[in-house]
Amino acid sequence: MKAVILAGGFGTRISEESQFKPKPMLEIGGKPILWHIMKEYSVYGITEFIICAGYKQHVIKEWFSDYFLHTSDITFDFTNGNQMIVHNKHVEPWKVTIVDTGLNTMTGGRVKRIRDYVGNETFLLTYGDAVGDVNMDELIAYHRSHGKIGTVSVYNFGQNKGVLDIAPNGSVNAFREKSDLDGDLINIGFMVFEPQLFDYIDGDATVFEKEPLNRLVAENQLMAYTHRGFWQCMDTLREKQQLEKLWDSGAAPWKLWE
């Protein structure tokens, strides 16, 4: 099964760093968050990826082109015809297709553009700016069990402040700390779709999270898989620093690989 990763946006909310490279290429522990996401999938034997690139797409292509330079020790022997010797090769069992889906294309349009690379088969879809310990085996099994076109992973992101229970007349009944029961369920990516999804996307101007998903909901073709583990996006510099701190601690919850 192929995994499609949306990696073409401008990343304006973390422009301190995304002005230099696409947000999925911002590093956590010296590796792009895109690499971390792909490693998560690899734990479950998912090793074929289609990356929907756009903004500064050449940076993604160049990083994978020079993968050995980023992950291995290298000897440059200028005395022997400018030979490059790669030591201790760190090779991932990946097949990676990077598609330039356009600079200003919306998320739905980016998905539509990679239709030929996916083919007529079930595929995974996620965003290139968030990590989590989603159990892909359970997610895929759940998707196959209900027979609908799509499954989205949802997560209770909760509140980050204290919570007040207020009576209709305005009096405060209780004040308590946040809990896992507070907050709304949000779409965190890590989705599974049947190829019929492409028929729900009109073109480049289509926002995936609006028309296509709303049509699937209206037709009772979208199901939710509730993730109860760890998940964190990287929308802001503060969130990037939080992920860096977790990684540096040696106990990053999304690191399911050795």
Image (spheres, rainbow, N blue to C red):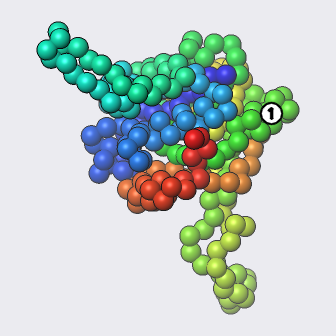
Where residue 224 sits in the image (x, y, percent)?
Answer: 75, 43
Residue highlighted by disc 1: 141
Local crowd size for mark 1, using a 10 Å CA cut-off: few (<14), some (14–19), many (≥20):
few
Residue 69: image quadrant is top left
**Residue in the picture at 70% in, 17% down:** 121
From the viewer's perspective, is residue 214 above or below residue 114? below
Where residue 80 sits in the image (x, y, percent)?
Answer: 17, 11
SS class, disc 1: helix
Q: In this view, does 216 lie to the left or right of 104?
A: right
Q: Is residue 88 left or right of residue 85?
A: right
**Residue in the picture at 63% in, 35% down:** 43
Looking at this rendering, what residue extends furthest in the front direction? 79
Residue 202 appearing in the image = no
Q: In this view, does 77 lie to the left or right of 232?
A: left
From the viewer's perspective, is residue 20 above or below residue 232? above
Residue 172: image quadrant is bottom right
Where residue 125 sits in the image (x, y, percent)?
Answer: 61, 31
Q: Which of the pair 54/45 is nearer the observer?
A: 45
Q: Which of the pair 227/214 is nearer the observer?
A: 227
**Residue in the picture at 46% in, 50% down:** 234
In this rendering, the count of numbered labels is: 1
Instruction: State the quadrant of the N terminus.
Output: top right
Residue 161 appearing in the image = yes
Where residue 119 sits in the image (x, y, percent)?
Answer: 63, 13
Instruction: State the quadrant of the C terminus.
Output: top right
Q: What residue type is labelled 1?
A: Ala
Q: Which of the pair 22/79 is nearer the observer?
A: 79
